[in-house]
Image (cartoon, rainbow, N blue to C red):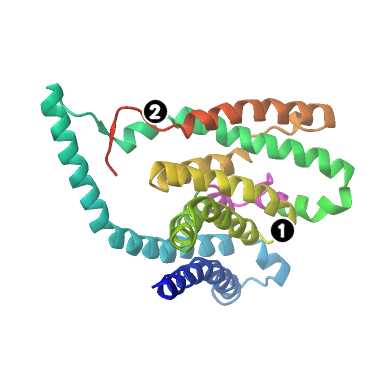
Amino acid sequence: MSTNNQNRKGLQLLFATVPLLLSFIISLIAFFAAVFIRGALLHSETTTSEAADDGIVYLINYSLHIIIFGFWYTMILQERAPFSGNVSTEAGKTSKKKSKNSGKEPEEWHPVKYWAKRLPILLLIGYGLQLCVSGIIAILSTAFPDLFASYKELIQSLAGTDIDWMTFLSVSFLAPIGEELLFRGVVFHYAKGAMKLKPAIIFQAVLFGIYHMNLIQFVYAVVIGYLLGVLAERAGSILPGIVLHIIINLSAYLIPGVFIDNIPKAALCSVLALGIVIPCCIVMLKKPKSKKRRD
């Protein structure tokens, strides 16, 4: 029995790792597809380095992520549906018993209403996180310019003033949806089957960091990935995480350079942002009271 359990956990861990490898293959397919589109269809000569930062690559890449991992996540939800149905049925029975005793209608937990009310909090957290990270990076890049040179080029290609609409659409909206489906949807699901909850949250966050293929992004992506993992578990859905992820990515275009153009201002912005983010996260992750949860 123990051997079978270990084998099952090993298989779940394998399934938790495979999606990351698949995402790299998808990225390669998107790259060659963009080169083909530019060359064969648009008759535009594109070098390898130019193709890597092409908006068409991002558009194809994240569209494929949404399609493939969206289908995969749908299959997972269908597998969980019978169990969820039993839980809601039992909860309904318990609620009816309580309502008979109290004489009041049971108060149901409505996820959409609950998280819609917390949209301002998500906005504060998303913008605050982006401001905090931008401030810290501005400080460190001043101290270690060589280390952050390639990172600055990457960010300029993704969030600079001269980006095309395909890059903006992909980075701001498609990437958050695709990445949440991949990591908080598929990877996290299998990780929870292979290990306890906290290690599973850390596991998916680390894979999220590795996915960015950049040491600097790895560090803050792990932190953000951990927060998104906790949010997905607490919400019982990846939808609030998708909204928060979109806010974080969009905020990269909404932070004025004057906020972080020198070390004192960057440090002040980072501290103030962190002072807002921490209490907002506490409020956001607080469990709803006296409500019957209906997933």
Q: Is residue 56 magenta?
A: no
Label 1: few (<14), some (14–19) or many (≥20) C-alpha neighbours in 10 Å? some
Q: In the picture, which quadrant includes the C terminus?
A: top left
State which quadrant residue 277 falls in.
top right
Three-letter amino acid code of the residue under disc 1: Asn
Label 2 belongs to which residue? 117
Q: How many marks?
A: 2
In the picture, measured across the screen, residue 12 lies left or right of residue 109, that is: right
**Residue 243, image x and y in percent?**
46, 42
Three-letter amino acid code of the residue under disc 2: Lys
Label 2: few (<14), some (14–19) or many (≥20) C-alpha neighbours in 10 Å? few
Q: Is residue 162 above or below residue 185?
A: above
* Residue range corresponding to the magenta coloring: 155-172
Q: Is there any visible trace of residue 274 in the rendered image? A: yes
Label 1 belongs to which residue? 214
**Residue 100, image x and y in percent?**
10, 28
Between 105 and 238, the one nearer to me in the picture: 105
Q: Is residue 64 above or below residue 3?
A: above
In the picture, measured across the screen, residue 99 lies left or right of residue 74, that is: left
Query: Which secondary structure class fits the magenta region best?
Result: helix
Q: In the picture, which quadrant includes the N terminus?
A: bottom left
Residue with the most extreme front position: 1
Q: In this view, does 182 lie above or below 225?
A: below
Who comes first in sequence, dot 1 or dot 2? 2
> Badges 1 and 2: C-beta atoms under 8 Å apart?
no
Q: Which residue is drawn at 57% across and 41% down?
A: 248
Of helix, strand and loop, which one carries label 1? loop
